[in-house]
Amino acid sequence: MKKLSDSHISLFLSLYFLSLLTGCVDPYRPPEITSPNSYLVVNGFFDSAPGATTTISLSRTQNLADPKLPTAETKAVVTIEMPNKTAYTLKEGTSGAYTLTGVMPVVGETYRLHIKTKGQDYYSDYVPVVPTPPIDSISWRAENDGLQINVNTHDPTNNTHYYRWDFASTWEYYTLYNSLLEIKNTQIVDRLQSVFRCWGSDNSTNIITTSTNRLSQDVVSQFPLLHIPSTSIKLGVKYSIMVRQIGLTQAGFEYYDQLARITQNVGSIFDPQPTQITGNIHSATTASDLVLGFFRVGTVDSKRLFISRSQLPFGWNTYTGLGGCTMDTLSKKDVLDMKPAIISYDELTKMYFTTSEDCADCRTRGGVITKPDFWK
């Protein structure tokens, strides 16, 4: 099966579970899933920030069972064009990534993306430049069951009206024991890099949009971005969130809003039914040749927030998964045979204090020991 967009996968799952409810033996396999076609995926935008580098990434859909990463679309000719025939050609750097520097779009003009692959031409609609107003603030409040994070913004010119956000989370955490020794080449040696303190990270997965089009003022106040349970390891020491805000056209908003509805609201038969979602990029020769993605021109504004554990309610207890950690004492021979995490060495008893890797190496929970440059 092909690795298609979330909308196609949602369609398949919805129809499959509906067939179970109605007693069907064989699940329905829609053409979008069984089709042998490989569709073009376009990711990126024409960045209008001064000095910015625009990057457009191209790839192809592939089999769901294929363990490889998505196939990059290489050796394409990618240009950004204006109605007056002015064209800017992007250069391919890493496979499938095409960049443009030194060109800044002009507010009031329109631009389109042109992609020429082997035997095919793809064009986006002409789109205007949409500057993104700055984020006013990222606010938070402690609720009974966790931390609620909201965003606030406004456009004094009353021109934006359509917004989208994404975010990246980073958190500091510790393991239970500080491992001072390790095994290297059958020898017990001092650990040169501490694995006691780590930083974890993840990115937003949902599509987050809102519109102020029906309001008298272009103001977004206390819009909910994220809720973190009070027991989350993210809140154990220090947490940071980097929020990115994007101004959209009405067409861009409708695209992302519809995509969110069919990919994030599939919990019951009363939710919106999955439909085929197409962006503003189309094949010039074959209407059935779908293109996944939406081309826009504009800027991104970002703001970072830090929250320390001392700012949160005293009664919140972080779940670390380390409640079952124990410490043992082993001889050198047993340490070399069993290869546990080594906490320290006792000169008096000539024994090593040991524990499991999960209890002494923070990297086992997916984090890294390198402190982020922005951390404070």
Image: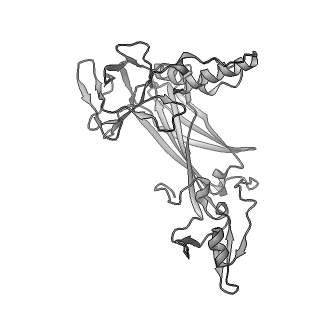
Q: How many marks?
A: 0
Front residue of 250/37: it is 37
267 to the left or right of 128: right
**Residue at the image position 49 percent from the left and 35 percent from the top:** 245
Taking 93 as reference, is 337 above or below it? below
Q: At which x and y percent is residue 76?
A: 31, 29
192 to the left or right of 116: right
In the image as oriented, which residue stretches furthest toward the bottom?
348
Q: Quadrant of residue 181?
A: bottom right
Q: Quadrant of residue 249?
A: top left
Taking 106 as reference, is 52 above or below it? below
Q: Is residue 261 visible?
A: no
Front residue of 268/121: it is 121
User: Image quadrant for the N terminus?
Assistant: top right
Front residue of 292/37: it is 37
- What colouring method underlies this structural image? one colour
Q: At which x and y percent is residue 352?
A: 67, 77
Q: Quadrant of residue 24?
A: top right
Taking 144 as reference, is 63 above or below it? above
Q: At which x and y percent is residue 208?
A: 56, 31
350 to the left or right of 104: right
Q: At which x and y percent is residue 270?
A: 71, 18
Q: Is residue 157 visible?
A: yes
Front residue of 340/217: it is 340
**Residue at the image position 55 percent from the left and 73 percent from the top:** 186
